[in-house]
């Protein structure tokens, strides 16, 4: 069975500051990893994904994430946030085989203050 | 190209009633998944349909059902509504199936269901 833990339910940060949203997963097999963003009153939008290869993955809107197999982590980072980055962020894990259904974390609310 | 379309956007129903939600996936996507999102439980997987067949199912009671049509459009139905069914219901479509590399989901904007 696979699971995802997003360690912070809420992360407040000032505009133009760097941010890291943490995600840890547990799985007995290799994994695919995803980050999604959800703006108010909208569905989730894919930010980036890790399937294989380079452990540093770049996504949309200036976000990037690093896959760390030894620490079973996939933290999301952005060097300088904007007010418009205020949203809910979800980490998700999926095994390559078997069910195609990802397991989502509980989400982290990023709040960017001016 | 058009995204995932969910209708209606908002619904208010009374306890005991039933409701049908609709989802039109991205053209060419054969997989449609449904999720229930609530503040307390986060995103919970309901079921997935692929080529008109239910391929995966989450841990929800039988009051929750769904189907997929030959054009990949999907509906989910909730019968005998309870107050706890109030949630945002999200539909997600994907190309996935067989050996296709995972591209991730494309989500619709959701249907906000309120049960009173």
Image (spheres, coloured by chain):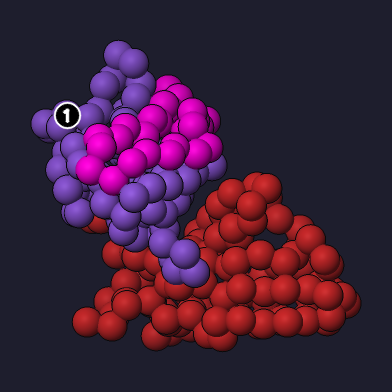
Chain colours: A purple, B red
Q: Is residue B52 above or below residue A38?
A: below
Region in magenta: A1-29
Task: Write down the residue under mark 1.
Answer: A55
Query: Left of A65 or right of it: where is B47?
Result: right
Of all residues, the one furthest to the top in this rendering is: A70
On the image, the x and y values in percent for residue B45 come to: 57, 54
Q: Is residue A107 visible?
A: yes
Q: Is residue A4 visible?
A: no
- Label 1: chain letter: A
Q: Residue at x 34, y 65 (%)?
A: B106
Query: Is A15 part of what is drawn in magenta?
Result: yes
Under circle 1, the secondary element is loop
Query: Left of B89 or right of it: where is B94?
Result: left
Count the marks: 1
Q: Nearer the viewer, residue B108 or A75?
A: A75
Of all residues, the one furthest to the right in this rendering is: B16
Q: Is residue A12 above or below residue B10?
A: above
Q: Residue at x 72, y 74 (%)?
A: B114
Q: Callout 1: 10 Å neighbours few (<14), some, many (20+)?
A: some
| Res. B87 image quadrant | bottom right
Query: Left of B1 or right of it: where is A73?
Result: right
Q: Residue at x 45, y 68 (%)?
A: A42
Q: Residue at x 57, y 75 (%)?
A: B111
Query: Is A90 part of what is drawn in magenta?
Result: no
């Amino acid at each position: 069975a696979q699971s995802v833990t997003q360690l912070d339910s809420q992360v407040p940060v000032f505009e133009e500051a760097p941010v890291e949203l943490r995600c840890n997963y547990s799985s007995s097999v290799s994994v695919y990893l995803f980050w999604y963003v959800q703006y108010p009153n909208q569905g989730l939008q894919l930010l980036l994904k890790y399937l294989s290869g380079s452990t540093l993955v770049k996504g949309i809107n200036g976000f990037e994430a690093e896959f760390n197999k030894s620490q079973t982590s996939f933290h999301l980072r952005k060097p300088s946030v904007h007010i418009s980055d205020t949203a809910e962020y979800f980490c998700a894990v999926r095994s390559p085989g078997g069910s195609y259904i990802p397991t989502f974390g509980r989400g982290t609310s990023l709040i960017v203050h001016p | 190209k058009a995204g995932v379309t969910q209708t209606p956007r908002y619904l208010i129903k009374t306890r005991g009633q039933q409701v049908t939600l609709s989802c039109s996936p991205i053209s060419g996507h054969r997989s449609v998944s449904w999720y229930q999102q609530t503040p307390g439980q986060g995103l919970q997987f309901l079921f997935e349909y692929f080529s008109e067949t239910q391929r995966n199912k989450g841990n929800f009671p039988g009051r929750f059902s769904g189907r997929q049509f030959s054009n990949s459009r999907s509906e989910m139905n909730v019968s005998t509504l309870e107050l706890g069914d109030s949630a945002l219901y999200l539909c997600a479509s994907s190309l996935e199936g067989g050996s296709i590399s995972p591209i991730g989901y494309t989500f619709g904007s959701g249907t906000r269901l309120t049960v009173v």
